[in-house]
Image (cartoon, helix red, strand yellow):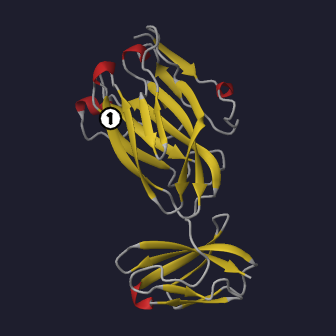
Amino acid sequence: MKKLSILLSIGACSLLSAQYCLPTFEYSGNMAIGEAIMNVTFGTINNTSPSVTNGTAPPNYEDFTSISTDIQMGSNYPISVKGPSGTFPSDVVVFIDFNKNGSFDDAGESFFIGRLEPANPFNAKTITGNITIPGTALPGTTKMRVLKNTNIAAYSDPNAVTSIHSACGSLRSGQVEDYSVNIVAANLSTHDQNINGDNLRLYPNPTNGIVQIKGVESLKNYEVYSISGQKVLEGNSTSLNMNQLIPGTYLIKMKLKNNTMITEKIIKK
């Protein structure tokens, strides 16, 4: 394996903002024998890319931002990543820029999916994990990064922590794939309705200022967010005083005593 430091080109991605940095890989010479990501499945994304093409390894960075899926605030989604892993195990971490600030390294934006055991491309393994979309995520299109990197420490210590500490920085050997995701609010009605089997209700909705929560015996607490994702209210009472809020659409996240999460839309007139 030939050792070299390769800086991945930001200009390789037409949709990649200059704000998004890319990692450097210490080794790249073994890409042909098992460092590529071969499949990513997430939501409606099901993208397969070869580990070898005509005997040539793919690049360390591949731009798949033209491939997108809708993801809903407050929902949980399974994700699977397939790939070989040469001589040493490889860790896979997924990043989503929920606040759309051009960085993947904010709290809550990274997900350790798992560790691919050593295998050649013909015996590539698949690992699965889950990603929860926070209710505070900003709506609209943002970037998702799938990062695979050899974790040499795990070869001798199965409990070694992931060697991926950032979406950038210096890594050993692996690949980066970028995708797009479209964050949407829950498909919720805006009128007084039964939203849970134990008669938890919001009324009136739309409101001039005060919203009542009926069925409070099931309510643990609530948080109210603006459509941009800013938390503006929180509490655990039967009444929400929205008089100080400007007219517009808000999302209320209600946690029940059985830890069920319900998200509803409220319109302030």
- Which residue sits at x=43%, y=8%? 55
Picture coordinates of residue 228, whole percent (x, y): 67, 64
Q: Is 233 situated above or below 55? A: below
Q: Is 111 placed above or below 220 here?
A: above
Q: Is residue 209 visible?
A: yes
Please name whichever residue, 155 or 189, is drawn nearer the observer in this view of the structure. Answer: 189
Q: Is 207 situated left or right of 104 in this image?
A: right
Residue 24 locus on image (x, y percent) = 54, 26
Relative placement, left or right, of 201 versus 183 is: left
- Residue 118 rendering spot, x and y as whole percentages: 28, 26
Which residue is at 69% across, 88% downward?
A: 209
| Circle 1 residue | 126
Place of residue 189 in the rendered image (x, y in percent of width and height, measured from the top left): 58, 74
Q: Quadrant of residue 30?
A: top left
Q: SS at mark 1?
A: strand
Q: Amino acid at mark 1?
A: Thr
Quadrant placement of the N terminus: top left
